[in-house]
Image: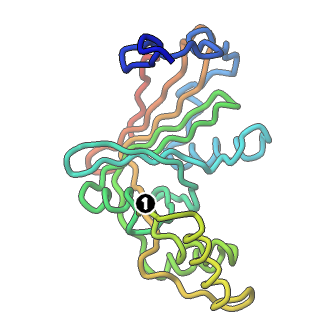
Amino acid sequence: MRQDDRVTDRDPLPAPGPDPASMREQYRADGLDESGLAGHPMEQFGRWFAQAATAGAVYEPNAMVVSTADADGRPSSRTVLLKQFDEQGFVFFTNYGSRKARELAVNPHVSLLFPWHAVARQVVVTGTAVRTGRDETAAYFRTRPHGSQLGAWASAQSSVVASRAGLEASYAELAARYPAGEQVPVPPHWGGFRVAPVAVEFWQGRENRLHDRLRYAAREGGGWRVERLSP
């Protein structure tokens, strides 16, 4: 290769295949009207969640993007599975040594995003996270598949590992110690977070990008007000 043929940091990147600027969908779903909303955002979420789960088009409707920020405001996001929800909020479980858990320890403000693209819907939650009690954590841990219980012990989530082989060796050691059918203890470093919402936005795709965006915002002293946001 000649000196002039070498790729430098200033050379343009190779042209990609599909052009993302030309990718677009025309949403023709039914609209979202204030008169049809439930009185409480968690009830409205329950309606939409049931529809997403039964539609058959949404893969893992309980998958949500959890966004946190550290003490300096630097954000990070990842996909996590919702495991419970009720009037108190949304619950997920994780390793308390993970990046998200460490960030929530210093900054409990969190955002959740349910990206139900297949039905042209999104739900965006902002709120604060607190740890679930150990009894609640243990009750959920017992429902997990045996392999997932072992995985909670084998993985020091978010930490650097030397190799895949080392991770699998740790898992194999645990599998030998706790074979199928034997109870796996709940890791002390593992548990849940409950996100108590202060705002929940329901986004419905509409034609010509005139989407419906209705947001429940918590009132001081209790209750909720509904706001329509411009798309």
Percent x, y of residue 212: 53, 21
- Colour theme: rainbow
Q: Which residue is more in the foreground, 104 or 119?
A: 104
Q: What residue is rendered at 47% in x and 14% in y?
A: 2
Q: What residue is rendered at 59% in x and 8% in y?
A: 208
Q: Which residue is more in the foreground, 204 or 100?
A: 100
- So how many labels did they put on this image? 1
Establish if 204 lies above or below 106: above
Q: Which residue is more in the foreground, 136 or 169?
A: 169
The residue to which callout 1 is attached is: 158
Q: What residue is rendered at 35% in x and 48% in y?
A: 68
Percent x, y of residue 200: 44, 40
Percent x, y of residue 112: 46, 45
* Residue 223 seen in render: no
Establish if 164 lies above or below 171: above
Dot 1 amino acid type? Ser
Percent x, y of residue 226: 42, 33
Q: What residue is rendered at 47% in x and 38% in y?
A: 124
Tag 1 secondary structure? loop
- Find the residue positioned furthest to the front: 2
